[in-house]
Amino acid sequence: MNDSVSVMPNQSSSVPSAPLVLDNLPDPPMLDRGCSLRMKQRIDLILLALEALELGGSEEMLATARELGLNQIVKNRVILWRLRCMNPWRRAHVRSAMTLSEAKALVIIASYRSRQLTVPIRQLLLAEQQIREKGLPLEQHFRLSEYLERFRAHFRSRMNPRRARVTAYNSDDRELNELALSLLGQLLFCTGTSGMQRFWIGLFDGEVA
């Protein structure tokens, strides 16, 4: 007598597993409300600085998502835009919860893009240092001036001027330049050893119990 073996279909096969690259970032204890508004703001500003560094920055982010297998989270330009609009400073602010996986994906994308742009990031920060030492205006350096101009344009076109902090930045080019340069330093930080992990953990400063 032949025993028949019944093979049950794998019910989980249709559910995509989380990208393995997400495991590069630890899971800190989360508050019940999920990712804070401050976290969403900081991630979006880092991505804004990357956009100011290279033309077609959003497309490069999407290409990086595909390369790292994160395209099941950041599937297309619309999803990327929606995630970034969770920044409360945005004109088109989306009042949605950002999941831990979504936040990780954006941080990983930002960090990998930063590594690809390590040379120009270092060059711009060195130029800033040399110009300040000489007491010259930042606009004296063409590439640095170009980065700052792009950042100011992106910031002013996308952020809500009715927000108090945004208004303060909009009224003073120097304030916006300092923000752009501060973000440039954070991008360089991401390129270092364990920089991605340290940037990620830093997002939770004061946010976890």
Image: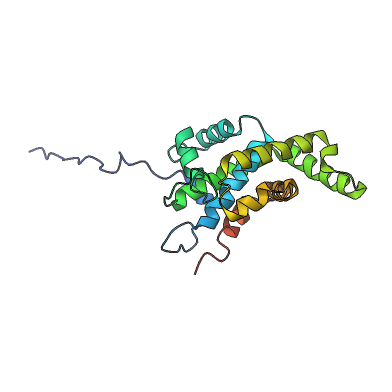
From the top left corner, tell me how far across and down residue 195 is, in percent: 65, 52
Residue at 56 percent of width and 45 percent of height: 108
Figure quadrant of the N terminus = top left
**In-image side of 49 versus 70 (left or right):** right
Q: Nearer the viewer, residue 94 or 62?
A: 94
Count up the numbered dots.
Answer: 0
Q: Is residue 158 left or right of residue 69?
A: right
The residue lying at 10 percent from left, 37 percent from top is 2
Q: Position of residue 134 (x, y in %)?
A: 92, 47
Whether residue 40 can be seen here = yes
Name the residue furthest right.
134
Give percent across and percent down for residue 172.
72, 48
User: In the rendered image of this protein, does residue 186 appear above or below residue 79?
Assistant: below
Residue at the far bottom in the pictured view: 209
**In the rendering, at what x and y percent does residue 49 appear?**
65, 42
Which residue occupies the extreme left position in the image? Answer: 1
Colour pattern of the rendering: rainbow
**Residue at 88% in and 45% down:** 130
Residue 194 in view in this figure = no
